[in-house]
Image: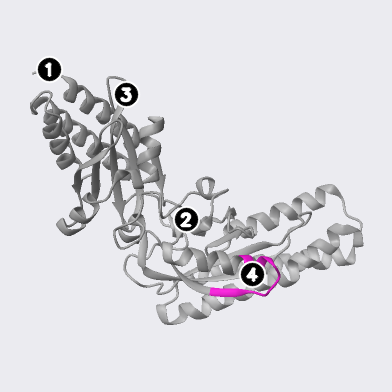
Amino acid sequence: MAQTDEFGEELVDFVRRVAELKAARSVSGGDLPTVLDAAIFELDHVADQLWPWYERLSSGGQPRTGSADRQEQHLLRAVFQRFPLPVALVDRAAVVRRLNFAATSFTGVRAGFATGRPLTALLAHADRAAFRSQAAAVARGEGDRSLTVHLQQQPSAPVHTTLAAVRPSGEPHPTVLVVLQPGDPLAPGTPPAIATSAPSVPDLTETTRHAALMDLLDEMTTTLLTAPRGDRDAIVRRAAQVLHGRFADWVIVDMGSARMSRTTVLAPSAEEAAALAERDPALSPLITEAAHTGSPSLQVRPEDPDAFGRTAEGAPVLVQANVTSLLCVPLRVGGAVQGVLTLFRCGARLAFSMAEAKAMDTVSRHMALAMTATP
């Protein structure tokens, strides 16, 4: 019992130090690196001292009750969730096991969405391979690592990551503890790593997006009703112009049944549009799958860089355009797929939502009705 009591006292002290770190997050910018160093030290203390100590107690070195085990596991989980730095637990393949509250705030991704998906999906394409390699090395027991990466939503802001191996009780393989720190905590636009205790205010983001979507649908309906009936090219061109800019950074339309041809490309620049317009839609796995299955596809932070094919120079289209989310919607005419509408959002722009994907599915059906209507 002496060992158990000593462990409990050490854990209480650790929780107290974490509370002090949380209180110190409001220090001036010059002192913030010292606070971050202290936080990393506390994480090392958990990984190197508290966790092995807990495992020794749990393995039978000291008699324990099931109730006490559950209480300490609950306490350790609470410490992880409330830790003031963004922290993730990933396996050797960089698949997320857990995100703490600070990590969800920092990345802008909910824990339920991230769990079971690769953490690399949140990173810029250029950093994914390096991160996977370092995570695998840490999981193999080759020592702790650190590297600088960039979030796909904010590619200009460096993020320092520290990777350390921990072995959860009862699991055969080590887990990798990932700590994320903004390269410049005071840089404009850097998402906060810690949720503040300021009084909550109404979040109007979803309401605003819904209102904008309704305005878009209204304009699209007006456009389709006033377009020349049965003139497929005019309808596609006018619909693409409505979507471009206000709803998507890129609008690509491929038409045809047996073999598709690229009829419309609207991009951030005329040069980019012309380059993509020359590419064969058959070289895009995403287009081919949508045309074959007739099912829409919504991807946030696309994992496969070659999903939309490559440019004439051999670079993946999704990487070159810095695509952070995409929608691929088949156009059904008379029950058969006669075309595919593809939309890209790039950079820090908000990803397509499920509501927006549903709206585009409706738009595709209305476009098909307009294309098949008789004059």
Residue neighbourhood size for the residue with mark 3, other residues' Cα within 10 Å, grouped as few (<14), some (14–19), many (≥20): few
Residue neighbourhood size for the residue with mark 2, other residues' Cα within 10 Å, grouped as few (<14), some (14–19), many (≥20): many
Query: In this rendering, is residue 89 above or below 14?
Result: above
- Contact? badges 1 and 2 (CB < 8 Å): no
Q: Which type of secondary structure does the marked residue at label 4 adopt?
A: helix
Three-letter amino acid code at the position of disc 2: Ala
x, y percent for residue 166: 70, 65
Residue span colored magenta: 136-146
Alpha carbon distance from label 3 to label 1? 18 Å
Q: Mark 1 points at which residue?
A: 374
**Residue 11: quadrant of the picture:** bottom right
Q: Name the residue under label 2.
A: 121
Three-letter amino acid code at the position of disc 4: Ala
Q: Name the residue under label 3.
A: 336
Q: Name the residue under label 4.
A: 137
Please count the marks in the image: 4
Looking at the image, tell me whether mark 4 or mark 1 is earlier in sequence order.
4
Alpha carbon distance from label 4 to label 3? 49 Å
Three-letter amino acid code at the position of disc 1: Thr
- Contact? badges 4 and 3 (CB < 8 Å): no
Q: Residue at position x 17%, y 35% from top?
A: 236
x, y percent for residue 87: 56, 62
Residue neighbourhood size for the residue with mark 1, other residues' Cα within 10 Å, grouped as few (<14), some (14–19), many (≥20): few
- Contact? badges 4 and 1 (CB < 8 Å): no
Q: Residue at position x 81%, y 47% from top?
A: 67
Residue neighbourhood size for the residue with mark 4, other residues' Cα within 10 Å, grouped as few (<14), some (14–19), many (≥20): some
